[in-house]
Image (cartoon, rainbow, N blue to C red):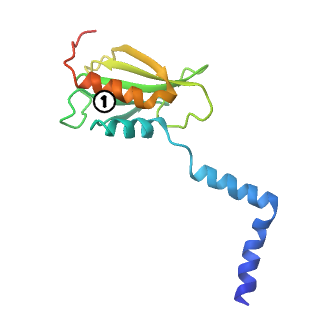
Amino acid sequence: MEADESEAQDEPLKTPYARGRAEAHAVTLHLEEHPDQALRRALAVHGLKAYLDEDCGNSWLRIPFDQTRDWDGVGWHLVVFVTVDGDDATFVDEPVGDRTAHWHLNRGVGDGTGRETRLMVSPYTATDQVAKVIAALLGTPQRHEL
C-alpha cells in the first residue's frame, strides 16, 4: 500500500507540464548570483569589505577607504553599482541576466552631500578586474579632492 502511495505522489511529475513547472520553480529558488555577491566575493580575495546601501529602489555597494573599522556612512569611500543599457536604475541586488550591463566605480566624500566623482566604467563581465582596481585604489595613498 505504501509503495502505491509513493508512486501516486510521483505520478504528477511525469507529465511534461508538471516537469516544466517543477523546473521553473527550481529556477526561481536558485537565481543567478547578484552583482553584490559577485563583487564581494572578488573583494574578499583582497581582504576588502563592502557594505550594501539603497534608496528609492536603487542599490549600490560602499567600500570605505578605512577598512580597519565598520562602515558608519562617514568618510571617503568608493561607490560601486551596475547599470543596464537603456535603464536609468542602479543596482547590485538583482541578477543581471542576459542584459548588457556595466560596473560603475565612483569615489564618494561621505560628508552627507552625496558628491561623487566617476573613476571608471567597465563591462559587467569584468568583475574580477573591477575588484583589482578597487584593491589598488585602497592600497595607495589617495588625494581626497573632488
- The residue furthest bottom is 1
Q: In which quarter of the image is the N terminus?
A: bottom right
**Camera sees residue 55:** no
Left/right placement of residue 6 relative to residue 138 reads right
**Front position in the image: 64 or 138:** 138
Residue drawn 59% across and 25% down? 100
x then y, percent, for residue 51: 33, 36
Classify residue 23 as left or right of residue 144.
right
Would residue 7 be found to the left or right of residue 83 on screen? Answer: right
- Label 1: element kind: strand
- Tell me which amino acid carries mark 1: Ile
Of all residues, the one furthest to the top in this rendering is 146
The residue under the point 28% across, 20% down is 112
Q: Position of residue 145 (x, y in %)?
A: 24, 10
**Near-viewer residue (33 or 61):** 33
Please name the residue that numbered disc 1 is placed on. Answer: 63
In the rendered image, residue 78, in percent from the top left (x then y), is placed at: 32, 24
Q: Is residue 145 above or below residue 23?
A: above
As drawn, is 92 to the left or to the right of 144? right
Query: Which image quadrant is residue 86 in?
Result: top right
Crowding at mark 1 (Cα within 10 Å: few <14, some 14-19, many 20+) = many
Up-down: is 96 above or below 87? Answer: below
- Residue 102 visible in image: yes
How many numbered badges does the structure rendering display? 1
Q: Give the quadrant of the C terminus.
A: top left
Between 99 and 51, the one lying in front of the other is 99
- Which of the 4 image quadrants contains residue 52? top left
* Residue 142 position within the rendered picture, expressed as x and y whole percent measured from the top left: 21, 16
Say which quarter of the image contains residue 134.
top left
Q: Look at 32% across and 18% down and name the residue there.
A: 107
